[in-house]
Image: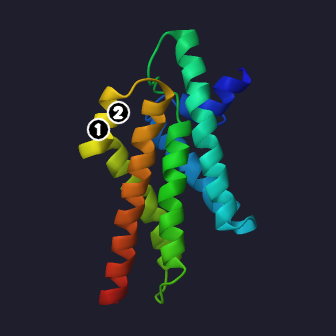
Amino acid sequence: MDLNRLFITFGGSGLAPKAPGTAGSLAALIVGVALLQVVPMQTLFMLTLAITIIGVFEINKYEKATNSHDDKSIVIDEVAGMWIALMFAIATAEKMNYAYAYEIAIVGSFAAFRLFDIWKPSTIGVIDRKVKGGLGVMGDDILAGIAGGLLTVVLLIGLEKIL
């Protein structure tokens, strides 16, 4: 496996035989939570920005070499989206004053990101269908990450109001 394939499959997690997007998102969640134990949120943000930009170019290179678009094994887009949703959720959970807010943020960000990534409502779906190349592959997941993160924020705030 060359470096391009290793990167766009996020260490091979996108090569899972079933639900590669979910496998890639779960791998991203685990790595993201682990990273936040040792680096500040700003570092995860910069890593997310870097993999997003690099991902566009690496996906373009892969698609040109294989004459394909949005190969299901490409999950670096799920990594970027998952980390965006996770950052929204964790930043909010740190301000909550109830038990298990951090854990709810982690599970909620995963579930909400996957919801928007699979459902692809509104602009997320338009980008997925109409924007070609690496920008299209990365773009819909970036928006799904933002939407999933915001939904998780609403969940966390709503739980604080009722608990």
Q: Which mark is residue 67?
A: none
Residue 24 to residue 84: above or below: above
Residue on which disc 1 sits: 125
Colour option used: rainbow
Residue 160 to residue 121: above or below: below
Q: Quadrant of the C terminus?
A: bottom left
Q: Badge 2, how many Cα within 10 Å: few under 14, some, many 20+?
A: some
Image coordinates for residue 19, horizontal then vertical, percent: 43, 35
Front residue of this view, candidates 37 and 129: 129
Camera sees residue 9 = no
Seen as rendered, the residue at the extreme right is 38
Q: Badge 1, how many Cα within 10 Å: few under 14, some, many 20+?
A: some
Q: Secondary structure beneath disc 2?
A: helix
What amino acid is labelled 1 in the image?
Gly
Identify the residue at horizontal 50%, vertical 28% (top origin).
Answer: 134
Front residue of this view, candidates 60 and 22: 60
Identify the residue at horizontal 50%, vertical 51% (top origin).
Answer: 82
**In 3D space, how far apart are the residues under numbered discs 1 and 2 (Cα atoms)?**
5 Å
Residue 51 to residue 37: above or below: above
Image coordinates for residue 95, horizontal then vertical, percent: 51, 84
What amino acid is labelled 2 in the image?
Asp
Image coordinates for residue 54, horizontal then vertical, percent: 63, 35
Identify the residue at horizontal 33%, vertical 50% (top origin).
Answer: 115
Q: Which mark is residue 128?
A: 2
Count of numbered marks: 2
Camera sees residue 91 = yes
Contact flag, marks 1 and 2 (Cβ < 8 Å): yes
Q: Quadrant of the N terminus?
A: top right
